[in-house]
Image: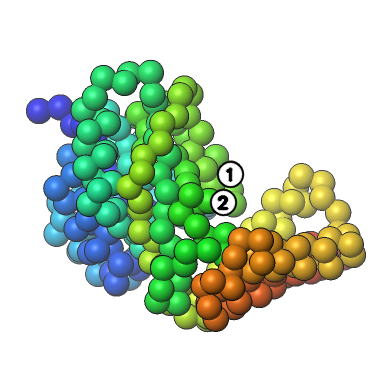
Amino acid sequence: MSIRLSVTVITLDEEKDLPRCLESVRELADEIIVVDSGSTDKTVEIAKRFGAKIYHREFDNYANQKNYAASKATGDWILSLDADEEIEPVLASEIKEVISGRDTHIVGYSIPRKNIIFGKFIRYTRWQPELDRHIWLWRRNKGKWVGSVHEEVVVDGEVGKLKGAKIHHQYETVTEFLDMINRYSELEADQMLERGVKFSYLQLFFQPTYNFVVRYFYRLGFLDGWRGFVLSYLMAFYHFSLWVKIWSKEVR
């Protein structure tokens, strides 16, 4: 029997989230590819329980890790999930329909994502599902992950849109969010310096202020209650941290 859909997941100590992720595609996936980078918990055991094909690779960056996972897929289509994501039933139905259809000119599909942060679906604050729409389903050998920070799939051909959403169970605590800020601002600072970006006092002031105003007012973050305010403030702090790190790396 030909393999229609491969689901790929990269993991590191994901025993809490992985069962929910894999359960959501149990009836959809013809094969599940899990690339683990050294879990010390029950992640690999859980993946085996779902019949996944397990591969081990030392992590260097997200794009390379996800491209490696895609290289192990044998299906006609690839659906990429993070371990803290799941797909809602309406999306599963859509995926079944499009991968069985005859729209051979479409090589990839963008999917919106619903973000659960601090225990609640964030409807605004620039986390709206349509603003977090990306290509996560594509024909094998027609797409590739690019970018060492905030990686994206780029496909060679026409892209369609699906209405059903991924559900992303993100940060449960402010501590987790601050860990993300530290990790990603470090990576992004290195990337910007490699591109020749120089530290700017103007950007140090402007970028945090701009991000707070856009998220909290223009993107209606105030409608998300205290979460909208906190998230707007934390993302302003992200951009402050980014420019401080650029400065600190320049003066070393």
Label 1 crowd (10 A; few <14 / some 14-19 / many >=20): few
Residue 174 % position (x, y): 53, 80
Please say whether residue 186 is visible from this viewpoint.
Answer: no
At a point 39% along the width and 26% down the height, the residue shown is 107
Counting from the top left corner in percent of width and height, residue 181 is at: 61, 69
Q: Is residue 142 above or below residue 187?
A: above
Say which quadrant the C terminus sits in.
bottom right
Q: Amino acid at mark 2?
A: His
The disc labelled 1 sits on which kind of residue?
Gly
Q: Residue 116, percent across and down?
A: 41, 68
Tag of residue 224: none
Return the residue nearer the eye: 164 or 59: 164
Q: Is residue 183 above or below residue 230?
A: above
Q: Is residue 4 above or below residue 242?
A: above
Label 1 residue SS: loop
Quarter of the view holding residue 70: top left
Read off the residue under disc 1. Answer: 147
Residue 46 position by quadrant: bottom left
